[in-house]
Image (cartoon, grey):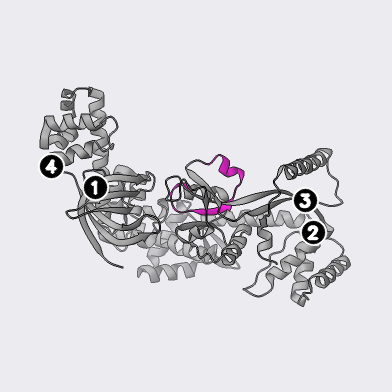
């Protein structure tokens, strides 16, 4: 990637996301005017910038500079000061007021605003209260500039620097200098290794207690990411020693202090001391409690009828189950809870589909409740804004917010992309539509999702139909057969059937593709 350095003056702010600092702006250099994009928070027209980055080609807007990091300085000329003040950065100062201020105070304008705001009352239209407010906002901007430059000195990217400053404001300097390990707990995306790098830059000792405690939590979080809710204490100490190159006694002291502060819990399992992060301990307890409740609240069916049903499904599908699969199906239907595990290609999907086919025939009734059309959603100020119908191929051109791979929509989205030869750049996977809409609204990417009621009340996003395609997710209503139902439940089922029938009569007779038909299990 080409390493690019450009020096110029901010001409115009084209777009800015106030929450994450993502900005599109034009920069005037000695030779040309260029469009720049990136996380460049709180810049304003008239400011001088030194930008480091690379050229990028946008599919709609052409050549742009992708900003990696930057340095900026306040305008020093009266023309630059006037442009800066009239940029809208301070509420209540427009072009005319900015011109009067600069004409009155000249090159001392910024000094007056910051140090002697009372003098601003000499300007027509500026009261004492307004002068104080102008100075307050100006100083806040100055503090943010200092914080961004301060954090860049620790090799922190502008995106993370913005997150850190939004969390701590004026305390940013104190926290980073004294205990940057707080950031690993309190700022999303700042892990132990990044905090440790900042601590080294701040001159914090290798055996600092905050460092040791942060390392212990890092080791436990890494284990959790690999599927372990706890670690044996001896293994935890060994891994922390390997990470920090400190004496095991320092690790034991840190574990003890974290226990006192209710951040860790220790439990004896099979005679061995094991250590949990407290939230994983309580999460595991909650899951175990719920599994026991489900397992206890179940009436086991007749085993002979289960064997008959397995044979029926094998005949219908032409798939003969292995003995282990038959045992798994029988076990699933004869107890309240069953967890099926296995690597890729071991037959989990075939086993689960057999279970579902048996339940569908014997125990459940259902009818289609609704069909939700798939749409593309984008942030409010996005290059695709204003385009009513968007080709599915646009998912190739922007970061994508997707569903978790193991979820129903995640599974079908994968087949959908494969069918239409889409290779999305999925930057994050979400468990539900609320999370997806939130991330799209914050300009992290675009998403493909069903047009649910969530979108009716969602602001800050655009909703685009798929051009040339109508793909629907069907929602079904299920209930158990041959079970007593309260009259209210029966009325509700009948009401939903009537509503669904009315909706079906009102729907245009169009050819629809359902997600369930994209791949045949």
Q: Give the range drawn in magenta.
A: 441-458
Residue 451 included in the magenta stretch of the image: yes
In primary-sequence order, the first of circles 3 and 2 is 2
Q: Give the quadrant of residue 18.
A: top left
- Say which of 309 and 318 sits in front: 318
Look at discs 4 and 2 and give the one toward the viewer.
Answer: 4
Q: Is mark 2 on a helix, strand or loop?
A: helix
Q: Distance between the residues labelled 1 and 4?
A: 14 Å
The residue under the point 67% across, 57% down is: 514
**Which residue bears the numbered disc 4?**
77
Q: Do the residues labelled 3 and 1 touch (CB within 8 Å)?
A: no
What crowding class fits label 2: few (fewer than 14 Cα within 10 Å), some (14-19), or many (20 or more)?
A: some
In primary-sequence order, the first of circles 1 and 4 is 1
What crowding class fits label 3: few (fewer than 14 Cα within 10 Å), some (14-19), or many (20 or more)?
A: some
**Which residue bears the numbered disc 1?**
10
**Which residue bears the numbered disc 2?**
360
In primary-sequence order, the first of circles 3 and 1 is 1
**Which residue bears the numbered disc 3?**
367
């Amino acid at each position: 990637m080409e390493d690019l350095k450009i020096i110029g003056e901010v001409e115009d702010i084209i777009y800015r996301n106030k929450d994450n600092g993502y900005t599109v702006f034009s920069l005037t250099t000695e030779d040309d005017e260029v469009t720049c994009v990136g996380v460049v928070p709180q810049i304003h027209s008239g400011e001088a910038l030194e930008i480091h980055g690379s050229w990028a080609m946008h599919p709609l807007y052409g050549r742009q500079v992708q900003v990696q990091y930057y340095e900026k300085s306040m305008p020093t000329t009266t023309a630059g000061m006037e442009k800066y003040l009239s940029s809208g950065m301070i509420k209540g100062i427009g072009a005319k007021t900015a011109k009067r201020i600069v004409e009155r105070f000249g090159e001392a304008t910024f000094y007056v605003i910051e140090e002697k705001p009372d003098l601003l009352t000499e300007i027509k239209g500026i009261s004492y209260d307004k002068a104080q407010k102008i100075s307050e906002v100006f100083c806040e901007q100055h503090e943010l500039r200092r914080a961004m430059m301060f954090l860049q000195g620790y090799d922190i990217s502008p995106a993370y620097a913005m997150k850190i400053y939004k969390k701590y404001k004026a305390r940013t300097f104190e926290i980073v200098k004294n205990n940057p390990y707080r950031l690993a707990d309190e700022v999303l995306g700042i892990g132990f290794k990044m905090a440790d790098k900042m601590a080294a830059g701040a001159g914090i000792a290798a055996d600092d207690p905050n460092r040791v405690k942060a390392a212990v939590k890092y080791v436990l979080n890494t284990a959790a990411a690999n599927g372990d809710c706890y670690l044996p204490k001896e293994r935890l100490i060994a891994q922390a020693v390997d990470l920090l190159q400190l004496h095991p006694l320092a690790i034991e002291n840190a574990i003890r202090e974290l226990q006192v502060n209710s951040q860790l819990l220790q439990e004896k399992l099979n005679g061995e001391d094991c250590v949990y992060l407290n939230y994983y301990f309580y999460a595991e307890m909650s899951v175990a409690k719920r599994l026991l409740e489900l397992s206890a609240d179940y009436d086991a069916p007749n085993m002979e009828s289960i064997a008959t049903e397995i044979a029926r499904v094998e005949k219908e599908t032409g798939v003969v189950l292995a003995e282990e699969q038959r045992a798994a199906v029988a076990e699933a239907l004869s107890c309240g809870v069953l967890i099926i595990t296995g690597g890729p290609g071991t037959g989990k999907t075939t086993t689960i589909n057999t279970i579902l086919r048996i339940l569908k025939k014997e125990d459940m009734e259902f009818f289609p409740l609704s069909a939700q059309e798939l749409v593309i959603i984008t942030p409010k100020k996005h290059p695709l804004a204003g385009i009513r119908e968007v080709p599915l191929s646009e998912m190739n051109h922007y970061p994508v917010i997707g569903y978790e791979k193991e979820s129903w929509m995640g599974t079908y989205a994968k087949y959908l992309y494969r069918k239409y030869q889409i290779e999305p750049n999925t930057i994050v996977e979400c468990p539900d539509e609320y999370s997806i809409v939130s991330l799209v609204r914050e300009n992290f990417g675009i998403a493909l999702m069903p047009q649910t009621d969530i979108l009716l009340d969602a602001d800050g996003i655009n909703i685009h139909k798929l051009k040339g395609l109508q793909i629907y997710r069907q929602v079904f209503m299920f209930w158990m057969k041959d079970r007593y139902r309260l009259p209210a439940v029966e009325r509700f089922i009948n009401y939903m059937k009537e509503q669904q029938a009315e909706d079906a009569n009102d729907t245009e007779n169009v050819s629809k593709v359902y997600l369930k038909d994209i791949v045949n299990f």
